Image (tube, rainbow, N blue to C red):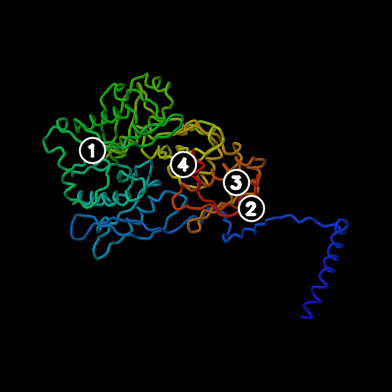
């Protein structure tokens, strides 16, 4: 009781002291406190890349191989090396041809070891792949050859976006029959069927001994290669075509007529002159001078060049279209020879960024390989919309082997909009602001693409307002994320985290694809 009484007695004195102290507070300087939120620095778990060698990875693919007990195909899965810098198709075909078989399936060629041929053995454009096999494939009996072709086809059409496959041997199409005159044409996926029965069904269309080929029709899947406007390039379109005659000359004329009708799916392909109507003589098939295959000879009127001069293509692009189309379908054809008036076409001029370069033809014979650089596929880019508020997805024709290459895609972005793009857009950055020398290296770490820029990257977005900064970041990220396997992108500048441009976007750390910005 006493202690409690004394505490109550002291309470008024304590209150007086507190009031006195508070009255003096105005004379004591107090540093105002500011509420600041400081994020911890982002710590990188990646090593900034130098060079492009570290873009390899392993992935699981489906291979189709001949069963040992029947003329059917069986699927197996296998982990193989792949690259984030190029299309998967070539690696997949190499893995298929290298497979030695097991207790239920044989190798693709059985006792014949199959291999790829040439500098560009697997071409891919749009939904069409063309595989070029080495001479060992000619040792296969025709049905076994078709079985191998269907195995390659089923394997490739397991990849996203691939629907049709052409098979060549040493740059030449192979006939299905012993005489080598029945075109195999393009192949599509066939799962669960008896491949031997499918072969017999196709073989039933052949011209029999003593039969007039002009009286025998044919329906086949054909790959037509159409020229692109404003660009030295061609792209394929597969379609089913019914021929009234199997005479090689008649089939050539029919293919030229199909080309002249133009594509049904490819944009920006110019109208073609009457490729068959301008012929002054029927196409001729003859033995090639070097003994390697057949030669198609086309003779056009003197004014043929004048007709194509008014179109948005040059002679080289048109010749590439004709050469690729005919040599991919007509069996045994190794080249074409074209006359305009009395003169043989001995060279064509190709446009590059500065000059015109001539492609010269030995003996005026044009080969498929002469035009390999003309084959284009569509690369996916994300550029700024015309009002600079969003991103737009742009499909741009590029050399087919570069459409999945991160270095090539970023350099295409740096070019800004081009006349042959699928849609109109604005550039993400000043034209030429990003050069090849500014790209120090690329690497893939699991599903993350690492991009290391030179210090000059700091100038690319210098002075950008917040929205332009955002579009630049996600234009780069979305473009790179169009590459298979890539789910995240991480940037470096000279091996360090990039500094921010506007403060709106933190460039350090992982970026994910942002389709919410795409109109």
Mark 4 vs 1, N-terminal side: 1
Q: Image check: 416 left or right of 376?
A: right
The residue beneath circle 2 is 494
Mark 4 vs 2, N-terminal side: 4
Q: Secondary structure at mark 1?
A: strand
The residue beneath circle 3 is 437
The residue sitting at the left extreme is 210
**Distance (Cα) linking label 2 and label 1:** 55 Å
Residue 425 lies, in percent from the top left, at 52, 33
Dot 1: within a 10 Å radius of its alpha carbon, few (fewer than 14), some, or many (20 or more) residues?
Answer: some
The residue nearer to you, when weighing 177 against 379, is 379
Mark 1 vs 3, N-terminal side: 1
Dot 3: within a 10 Å radius of its alpha carbon, few (fewer than 14), some, or many (20 or more) residues?
Answer: few
Q: Secondary structure at mark 4?
A: strand
Q: How many marks?
A: 4
Please identify the quadrant where the N terminus is shown. Answer: bottom right
Query: Which residue does the image show at 27% across and 44% down from the upper left?
Result: 187
**Distance (Cα) linking label 4 and label 3:** 22 Å
The residue beneath circle 1 is 220
The residue beneath circle 4 is 380
**Distance (Cα) linking label 1 and label 3:** 48 Å
Q: Secondary structure at mark 3?
A: helix
Q: Secondary structure at mark 2?
A: loop
């Amino acid at each position: 009781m006493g202690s409690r009484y004394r505490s109550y007695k002291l309470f008024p004195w304590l209150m007086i002291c507190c009031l006195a102290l508070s009255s003096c507070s105005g004379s004591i300087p107090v540093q105002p406190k500011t509420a600041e939120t400081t994020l911890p620095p982002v710590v990188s778990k990646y090593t900034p890349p130098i060079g492009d060698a570290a873009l390899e990875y392993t992935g699981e693919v489906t291979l189709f191989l001949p069963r040992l007990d029947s003329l059917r195909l069986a699927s197996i899965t296998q982990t193989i090396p792949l690259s984030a810098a190029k299309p998967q198709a070539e690696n997949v075909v190499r893995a298929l041809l290298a497979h030695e078989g097991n207790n239920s399936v044989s190798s693709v060629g059985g006792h014949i070891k199959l291999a790829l041929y040439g500098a560009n053995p697997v071409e891919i454009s749009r939904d069409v792949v063309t595989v070029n096999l080495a001479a060992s494939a000619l040792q296969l009996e025709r049905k076994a050859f078709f079985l191998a072709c269907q195995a390659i086809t089923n394997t490739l059409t397991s990849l996203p976006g691939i629907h049709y496959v052409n098979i060549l041997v040493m740059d030449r199409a192979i006939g299905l029959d012993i005489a080598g005159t029945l075109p195999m044409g393009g192949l599509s996926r066939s799962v669960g069927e008896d491949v031997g029965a499918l072969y017999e069904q196709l073989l039933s269309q052949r011209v029999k001994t003593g039969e007039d080929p002009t009286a025998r029709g044919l329906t086949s899947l054909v790959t037509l290669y159409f020229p692109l406007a404003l660009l030295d390039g061609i792209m394929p379109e597969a379609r089913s075509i019914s021929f009234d005659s199997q005479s090689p000359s008649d089939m050539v004329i029919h293919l030229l007529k199909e080309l002249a009708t133009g594509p049904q799916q490819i944009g920006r392909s110019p109208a073609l002159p009457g490729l068959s109507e301008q012929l002054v003589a029927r196409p001729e098939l003859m033995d090639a001078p070097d003994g390697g295959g057949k030669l198609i000879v086309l003779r056009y009127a003197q004014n043929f060049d004048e007709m194509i001069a008014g179109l948005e293509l040059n002679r080289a692009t048109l010749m590439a279209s004709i050469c690729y189309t005919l040599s991919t379908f007509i069996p045994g054809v190794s080249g074409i020879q074209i006359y305009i008036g009395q003169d043989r076409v001995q060279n064509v001029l190709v446009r590059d960024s500065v000059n015109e370069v001539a492609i010269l033809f030995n003996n005026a014979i044009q080969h498929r390989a002469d035009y390999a650089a003309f084959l284009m596929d569509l690369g996916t880019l994300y550029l700024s919309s015309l009002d600079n508020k969003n991103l737009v997805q742009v499909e741009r024709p590029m050399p087919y082997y570069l459409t999945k290459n991160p270095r090539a895609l970023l350099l295409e972005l740096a070019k800004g909009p081009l006349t042959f793009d699928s849609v109109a857009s604005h550039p993400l950055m000043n034209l030429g602001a990003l050069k090849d020398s500014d790209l120090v290296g690329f690497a893939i770490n699991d599903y993350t693409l690492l991009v290391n820029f030179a210090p000059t990257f700091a100038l690319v977005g210098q002075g950008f307002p917040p929205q332009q900064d955002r579009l630049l970041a996600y234009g780069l990220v979305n473009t790179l994320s169009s590459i298979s396997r890539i789910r995240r992108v991480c940037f470096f500048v000279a091996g360090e985290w990039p500094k921010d441009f506007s403060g709106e976007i933190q460039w350090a750390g992982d970026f994910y694809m942002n389709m919410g910005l795409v109109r």
